[in-house]
Image (cartoon, helix red, strand yellow):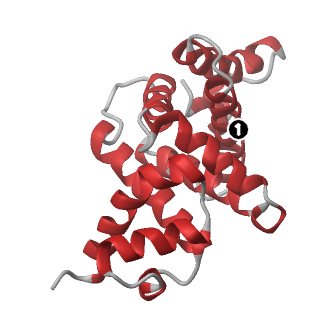
Amino acid sequence: MKNLNEQRVDFIKQLVPLVCAEGWLERVMYDVSEELWNDRIYYKTLFSDIEEIVQYFECSEDERMLKKIGNKKEGESTTAYIGSMLKYRIKEISGGKEMLIRLKEFYLALKHISDGPKAVWNTSDVIWRAAGDKSTDMNYYSKRFLLSSVYTMSIRHYVDDRTDIDGYIDNSLNKVVSCAKYLKLPKLEDIPILRMFS
């Protein structure tokens, strides 16, 4: 008999194409439960509700990104590293662009409006930690806020079928760094939040 996590993995794998076709709907959860276990409400033994299923999916995608790209190597540019993580997380998400559209629909529903920012923040946190960030002061929040903004706008750019998502991500990250130079702020090494992007 498979353990809980293995059953969850099976459920998500079976779920992805149906969600892409119909959305994050309860009837989809019923259909997958029936396909896998001949019991339409079996998914409720794995997850408490659809919100938890979406959260599990997002965390699984973060893990897949981290497994594929790995932690930042010594001497590697933080900006380039973060860019490669974002590109993979957006372009290689299970279900592709259709899944991003379905997640957007889910997060824009009034009852889930706070779930979207949490998911984006969690992914940004995973990326910063993999990049070697160990900050515990206000820079912890500033870095994740900036990256969350770039991540959100990059998803929107990609979903809207605009060209060159790689270039868009690179340009967005570079703007974060060049902003400090334009405003003639102190040296990069004196600003921990920006030093991490160099």
Image position, residue 184 (x, y; %): 81, 15
Secondary element at image label 1? helix
**Left or right of residue 190: residue 54:** left
Which of the 4 image quadrants contains residue 187? top right
> What residue did someone put label 1 on?
146
x then y, percent, for residue 60 = 40, 58
Q: Residue 84 appears at what percent x and percent y?
A: 43, 27
The amino acid sitting under disc 1 is Leu
Tell me if residue 125 can be seen. Answer: no
The N terminus sits in image quarter: bottom left
In the displayed structure, 104 sits above or below 98; it is below
Q: Which of 155 and 24 lies nearest the eye of the viewer? A: 24
Look at the image and tell me whether residue 165 can be seen.
yes
Residue located at (63% from left, 14% from top) = 171
Quadrant location of residue 51?
Answer: bottom right
Left or right, 174 with respect to 82, comes to right
Question: What is the crowding at mark 1: few (fewer than 14 residues within 10 Å), some, or many (at least 20)?
Answer: some
The residue located at (72%, 55%) in the rendering is 107
**Is 153 displayed left or right of 36 in the figure?**
right
Q: Measuring 59% from the left and 21% from the top, which residue is drawn there? A: 169
